[in-house]
Image (cartoon, grey):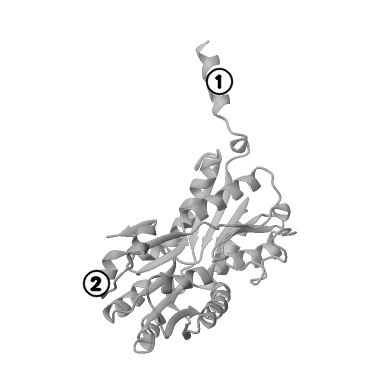
Amino acid sequence: MKRIIVFLLSLACFSAYAAGGPKQIGISQIVAHPALDLVQKGIIDGVEKCGLKNGKDVVFDVQLANGNMVTAGQIADKFIGAKKDLVVGIATPTALALASAYMKGSPKTPVIFSAVTDPVGAKLLKDIRKPGGNITGVSDLLPIDTQFQLIFDMGLKPKAVGIIYNAGEQNSRSQLELTKKAAALRKVKLVERAIASSADVAAATNGLMGQVDAIFITTDNTVVSALESVLKVANANKIPVFMSDTDSVKRGALAARGFDYYKHGLQTGAMVCRVLKGAKPSETPVEFQKDLQLVINAKTAAMIGFKVPAVMLKNADKVIK
């Protein structure tokens, strides 16, 4: 009788996924920084929330490209060689590397992207509603105009706003164009500084001093990964820095209207789960996250002598003190 009970318990705990071994999921992340790290955590937690236990039903292989596209390509090839059941690209460069490699080496393997601003512009797919191939995902397309407006809502009347971006990143170029439109609409000069790597960020920020009244940073992976270089210069010169992701405010930026990137990851994880359970990427529309949060760093405001309007403090989702 005891043996029968043990047998039945083992059957109850036995997952359909475990029957053929746990599903192997490869995650390729372009660079480590708080927002993308939260996406990664959200993906893993999101898969677990749908009932697939990490380590039993699924096994994650997380790889960092450290901002290097050659490394991103090598990670993609490694995943193909390891015969992953599904792969995830966090941010546009790694998503592109996976898409390119898998199109040639393993076209039937699902490729899911996360934190990709413009999947059509990046040529990951042609139609967000009907992807058609084996690639789909969750986009972090930002309402740049609303985010840029935060500069004015905080009481500033800038003549010029600076922006630093990596010209080599498709998502950054897309967001730059939207920022240009937002600045032009408000008759504000946008002073651009293009960089090629995180090592260029400090010099680019120094180049903006004396020319701008504020700095606006989008979700450029290269710049955000080196945000401390921006903040060290800008805060020393009492120039407020506005972000597109709220996690950067915790690091010392003044304010942001942005997504909760952990929730973005959870949303991606839920999609990964559906695909593992049989949903076809070709028939799974690209999803977007729309909820914005206002986060203000009161400590930074005091340090740079910036008076935050009382109404903004009252309406903020979070005030860091």
Which image quadrant for residue 126?
A: bottom right
> Does residue 220 appear anywhere in the picture?
no
Numbered circle sitting on residue 74: none
Q: Amino acid at mark 2?
A: Met
Residue 202 position within the rendered picture, expressed as x and y whole percent measured from the top left: 36, 81
129 sits to left or right of 1: right
- What residue is shown with label 1? 7
User: SS class of the residue under badge 2?
Assistant: helix
Image quarter in which the C terminus is found: bottom left
Tell which of 194 and 297 is nearer to you.
297
Query: Dot 2, how many residues are within 10 Å of its Cα: few (below 14), some (14-19), or many (20+)?
Result: few
Which image quadrant for residue 312?
A: bottom left
104 sits to left or right of 71: right
- What residue is shown with label 2? 303
Query: Please, is residue 184 above or below residue 288 in the view?
Result: below
User: SS class of the residue under badge 1?
Assistant: helix
Residue 221 position within the rendered picture, expressed as x and y whole percent measured from the top left: 47, 70
Residue 35 position within the rendered picture, expressed as x and y whole percent measured from the top left: 44, 61
Residue plotted at (54% across, 25% down): 10
> Does residue 308 appear anywhere in the picture?
yes
Query: Dot 1, how many residues are within 10 Å of its Cα: few (below 14), some (14-19), or many (20+)?
Result: few
First of labels 2, 1 by sequence position:
1
Q: Amino acid at mark 1?
A: Phe
Residue plotted at (70% across, 64% down): 103
Query: Please, is residue 52 above or below residue 220 in the view?
Result: above
- Tell which tag, 2 or 1, sits nearer the viewer: 2
Residue 231 position within the rendered picture, expressed as x and y whole percent measured from the top left: 33, 75
> Which residue in the rendered view is the most extreme toward the top?
1
> Which residue in the rendered view is the most extreme toward the front?
311
Residue plotted at (49% across, 46% down): 45
